[in-house]
Image: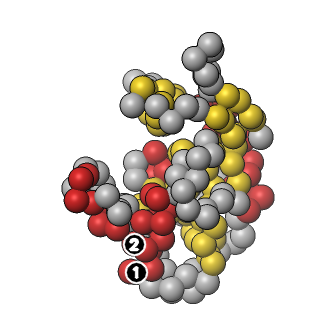
Amino acid sequence: MTTASSGEQGSLVLDAEALYRELLRGVRSLREPHTRLAGIASGGAWLAQRLQQDLGLEGAPGVLSSAMHRDDFAQRGLASSAHTALPFDVNGADILVLDDVLYTGRTVRAVLNELYDYGRPARVRLAVLVDRGGRELPVQPDFAAARVTLPASQSLALARNDGGSFVFQVKEA
């Protein structure tokens, strides 16, 4: 796992592809034969899709949208164009939820509510590419490829370049 920080003095440089390889290693260790992958739209869904392929798993991973269960729905509305799609039975399933960046925990709370609208899994775990701390809810990942510290005025998001490789975008809020 990588630990990094960014402040006004320096800039944060994260190699998203290297962190993806670390996430792949971590997911391999967490995964059991019947574990299903579900990514949080959009960065987590991209990760789940690529992991599904790199792990040689059949079928498609699930996609979880936080839009309908956000506690800031009135301000955000349906900002995300992705909709929840779970191509497996949630009841009794072992589900590994994937996300690109874990920050306050509010998105994870929302997707857990969404997931339970579809059934009652036997177990739900969380793996993230980057844990940036700053939690407002008691949510912790079972695996994080990196832990970074960013000022609250900055956001970090996964993107894909023209070649399809993962890159990070750091923006001022």
| Disc 2 to disc 1, C-alpha distance | 7 Å
Quadrant of residue 31 in the image? bottom right
Whole-percent x, y for residue 167 in the image: 51, 28
User: In this picture, is 55 found above or below 84?
Assistant: above
* Residue at screen point 25% across, 52% down: 76
Disc 1 residue crowd, few under 14, some 14–19, many 20+, Cα 10 Å: few
Whole-percent x, y for residue 13 in the image: 61, 21
User: In this picture, is 91 found above or below 18?
Assistant: below
Given the image, on which type of amino acid does mark 2 rest?
Glu
Q: Which mark is residue 118?
A: 1
* Residue at screen point 45% across, 80% down: 116
Q: Is residue 50 visible?
A: no
Given the image, on which type of amino acid does mark 1 rest?
Tyr
Q: Is residue 4 left or right of residue 85?
A: right
Disc 2 residue crowd, few under 14, some 14–19, many 20+, Cα 10 Å: some
Q: Which mark is residue 114?
A: 2
User: In this picture, is 43 found above or below 138?
Assistant: above
